[in-house]
Every structure is written in structure tokens, then in C-alpha cells.
Amino acid sequence: MIGLLAGLALLVACLGMLITVLRSDDEPDAIVDAPTTTGAVTTAAPTTTPTTEPPPTAAPTTAVPTSAATTAPQTTAAPTAVPITAAPTTAAPATAAPTTAPRSSAPSTTAAVADGVLQDPLPSGLTGAEVGSSLAAAQQLADALASGDWDTARRLNPALSDLSDAEFEDGYGGLDRAALLLVDATPAGDGHDLVAVLVANELAGVRTSFYCVVSNVSGEGTVRQRSADLVHRVPGTMAIDEVRQDPATLRLIRERCGRA
């Protein structure tokens, strides 16, 4: 019985304490004076609320602008050499230029012998066939001079061997075509002395000149010209066939050149 009462008393006490606590939560805290003690007053050190310092404000880091990498001035590369294009393996065959380009087509030697006699037999009594080799050599020299074949001219006429190409050009450069018309011939050693008219087409067809030429032709075909005199000149081009068919020109040739 006593135990039951004690338990009840303890329960009541607990309820009272609970009610007190609940009331204290609803009312403002009362200022409680600290009890007066006879001993020395101990002043409690104020509780210092730890001050949390804000982290130091870092100075804003201004990022250094990343600049483009400093590059050395661009060096202009030396131009790549253009490769030389090799000539095609199979090239069209080059036409070799003649050593001496003929300025005109000179009459053939055979034609000169056949057509180059004013009359047959000649006034001396010789026939065209008898003097044919000598007339052919003289015509070959005339062809070389007309075509600019200076080496052949030097070989056929030793008197011209010392002339330079420039001197030949100065003397014979205007000669386009030359044809001999034999007026007369006489024997001379193993060759002949010839009297002939050289019909010269000159200056690219500007004129035709007639020269009375006296020369000696040896049996070896060497030509030594003794004289060459201008006897007539006409404008334009006159071929040897036209001369043979022109009585006035033939008469003038007989009067001014040779023994006819």
C-alpha cells in the first residue's frame, strides 16, 4: 500500500514538473538575479562568439588575354622553280636549214649549156657541144653568186678566194638570178676563152641588167673572169628565153659585146 502511494506521489510530482516546463516555454524568461554569495564574486568570462572571418576576398584575377602566339614575320618561301619541261622524246624531225638559202631558183647547168648559146655554131666556128664544159663551169659560178653560195664561188674563181662573206654580200647580195648567153668562144690551152652576156635579175625583180663578161675557163673548170661591163638595163624581170626572142635586145648585145 505504501508503495502504491509512493508511486502515485512520484507520478504527481512528474506531472507537476511537466506542467511547469510547458508553462515556462510559453512565457518570457524571467530575469533571475544571481544569488548573493559571501564569497568573492566570480565574474564569468563573457562567452565570446567566435567570429568567423569571411574568407579574404580574392582580388579578381584579370586573366591576361591570351594573345596569339608571337610568331616571327612570315618568311616568303622562295618560289619553287618551274620544272623544265623536257622536249618530247619523239620530236618532229627538224628540217635542217640549208647552209646557204638560195634567193632564187637558178637555171640548171644542163639547161644553161643547151639554151645558153646565142648561135650554133659560134662565130669562131666552135659548136655549143665543144664548149659545153667551159660554159657549164662559168654558169655554175654565176649560180653560186646568185644563190649566196660563197664557198663554191671561192672554189670556182680563185680571184674571189680572199673575199669575206660580208664583201660577197655587198657585191652580189642584190643578184637574184643569173643566166649566161654565150656570144663566142675560142680555144685557150685545155679550156676556152668565153665572151658571154650575163642576164642578171636583180633586187627582187626590180630590174634586169646585161653584163658583157669575158672569162677564161680551164680544163679543170677554174673560172678566171677578166672583165664584166654593164651594157644594158631594163625594168622588171626578163628571162633568157625572152632575150632570145627580142630582136632589139639581141642586136644591142651583138653591138656592145663580143665578136658576133
Image (cartoon, rainbow, N blue to C red):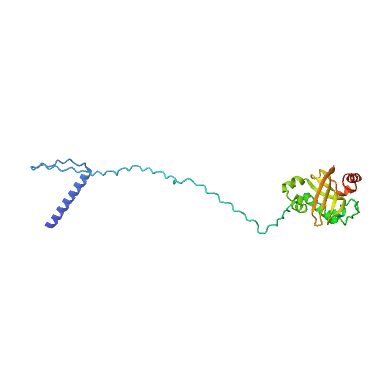
Figure quadrant of residue 255: top right
- Lateral position of residue 162 relative to residue 115, left or right: left
Q: Position of residue 198 (x, y in %)?
A: 84, 48
Taking depth in this image into account, of 194 and 89 the one nearest to the observer is: 194
Residue farthest along the front direction in this orientation: 189
Q: Position of residue 48 (x, y in %)?
A: 21, 43
Taking depth in this image into account, of 155 and 68 the one nearest to the observer is: 155
Figure quadrant of residue 222: bottom right
Work out which quarter of the rendered image holds the N terminus and state it: bottom left
Taking depth in this image into account, of 177 and 74 the one nearest to the observer is: 177
* Residue located 79% across and 47% down the image: 176
Q: Position of residue 238 (x, y in %)?
A: 85, 46
* Residue located 83% across and 49% down the image: 214
* Residue located 18% across and 49% down the image: 17
Q: Position of residue 63 (x, y in %)?
A: 39, 44
Residue farthest along the bottom direction in this orientation: 90
- Lateral position of residue 151 relative to residue 22, left or right: right
Residue farthest along the left direction in this orientation: 38
Compared to residue 5, the image places residue 235 above or below, namely above
Whether residue 105 is visible here, answered yes or no, is no
